[in-house]
Amino acid sequence: MSRDELRTFSWVAATVFALAVGVWRPRKLHWTVLGSVMLFAALNAGAGIYVLNHVGDARWSAGEPPLSAPSFSGTPVVGQFLGPLDTALNGVVGGVNEFLAFKQALPVALDFLAASGWALLLSFPLGILATVISYVMDRRRIADFEKYRATVDLLKDELEQVKRQISSGNSAGTALSAGNEVTDARPQTDAQGTIQRGEGPQ
């Protein structure tokens, strides 16, 4: 990938990560934003290191061809004596080309590293904000749980009261039925045919 493609890839990857994880876990959007910023920083840092590891790549040279040393070994008469000079010149030109390649690649790498640094700086306040939001959400969740538990306890107490009222109502109904029994006052006949009447009060 070229320099522009590397830069675009870091933006696209961070954006896709934020959208995918944001849709998957919408309640953790603050952590998703922080994660996407950290991913952007990591991708840019990796791109900068990649550029520094491929200093001689033509992608960072902006189209400038490397230098080449002239050859003196083909000079008539004295060419055979100038062979060591060609070797020395090639070594010098090779060193100059390496320096120029590093000089051309360094700004590209620094651009990626600078973007990574800015992303890391942005991640610090985002991390603090995400921590605060998580703390507030946890406190709210705990408060809701306590409210639900208090409601459940209240319903349990009311249910126990209803049970006691039902039990006391059944006991009172049974006692009332037993106290309202009426004695049969009709005349009774014994085995000898004598009529016996119910005993009244003496």
Image: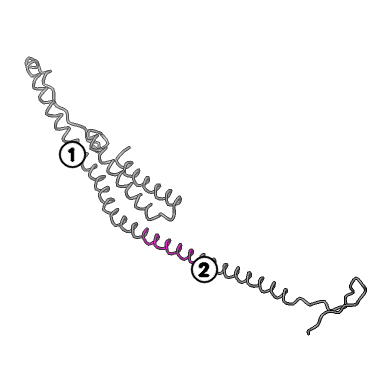
Farthest-out residue, right: 193
**In this rendering, the label closer to the viewer, 2 or 1:** 2
Residue 122, image x and y in percent? 28, 54
* Residue at figure coordinates x 48%, y 66% from the top left: 150
* Residue 25 horizontal side relative to residue 53, left or right: right
Badge 1 amino acid: Lys
Residue 130, image x and y in percent? 34, 57
Circle 2 residues within 10 Å: few <14, some 14–19, many ≥20: few
* Residue at figure coordinates x 78%, y 77% from the top left: 182
Counting residues from the start of the chain, the first of labels 2 and 1 encountered is 1
Find the distance from the CA under tag 2 to the CA under tag 1.
Answer: 76 Å
Residue 148 within the magenta-colored segment of the rendering: yes
What is the number of the mark on residue 154?
2
Q: Nearer the viewer, residue 127 or 17?
A: 127
- Where 106 sits versus 141, above or below? above
Secondary structure type for disc 1: helix
- Give the quarter of the figure containing the C terminus: bottom right
Residue 189 within the magenta-colored segment of the rendering: no
Badge 2 amino acid: Leu
* Residue at figure coordinates x 11%, y 22% from the top left: 87
Residue labelled with disc 1:
103
What is the number of the mark on residue 122?
none
* Residue 157 horizontal side relative to residue 54, left or right: right
Residue 83, image x and y in percent? 10, 18
Farthest-out residue, front: 192
| Magenta-tinted stretch | 134-150
Secondary structure type for disc 2: helix
